[in-house]
Image (spheres, rainbow, N blue to C red):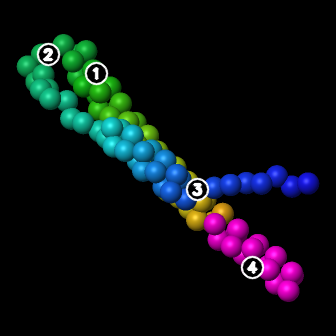
Amino acid sequence: MSETIRTNMETVESDAAQIEKAADFLQAVTLNPKDESTTLSVNGNLQEAFDFSQTLKAALGAAVDGEAANIRSTDAAFEQYDQMLASLAQEIAE
């Protein structure tokens, strides 16, 4: 006996939109104010580390956006496959 898989395109779209909304918080920001007067080497190192962290943060946001797109495309592909199987089942029944 086969299991039934149920999907809801509206729920999938809503979930994907929420994921994209979360990704909006994963955008790089600039260090403001930036300390240009301190001559300690640690200041430059910290600014460099901050910039690197923002690069990683932006990359994570882009990856999360990509996952939202994958969720949408998987749902669309499943819906297309489901319609194909329904048509095939109808042809066999006739």
* Disc 1 to disc 2, C-alpha distance: 11 Å
**In the rendered structure, which disc, 4 or 1, sits on the residue that comes first in sequence?**
1
Residue picked out by circle 4 = 87
Left or right of 36 on screen, residue 57: right
**Res. 2 image quadrant:** bottom right
Residue at image coords 65%, 71%: 80
Please state which amino acid type lies under the numbered disc 4.
Ser
Residue picked out by circle 1 = 45
Q: What is the magenta range?
A: 79-94
Q: Are marks 4 and 2 in contact (CB under 8 Å)?
A: no
What element does badge 1 sit on?
A: helix
**Res. 79 image quadrant:** bottom right
Please state which amino acid type lies under the numbered disc 2.
Thr
Residue at image coords 66%, 63%: 78
**Res. 24 image quadrant:** top left
What element does badge 2 sit on?
A: loop
Q: Quadrant of the C terminus?
A: bottom right
* Disc 4 to disc 2, C-alpha distance: 73 Å
- Asked whether the viewer can see residue 33, the reply is yes
Please state which amino acid type lies under the numbered disc 3.
Asn
Vertically, is 89 above or below 70? below
Please state which amino acid type lies under the numbered disc 1.
Asn
Left or right of 61 on screen, residue 91: right
Q: Within 10 angstroms of label 3, few (less than 14), some, or many (20 or more) residues?
A: few
Q: Nearer the viewer, residue 38 or 54?
A: 54
Q: Within 10 angstroms of label 4, few (less than 14), some, or many (20 or more) residues?
A: few
Residue picked out by circle 3 = 8
Q: Are marks 2 and 3 in contact (CB under 8 Å)?
A: no
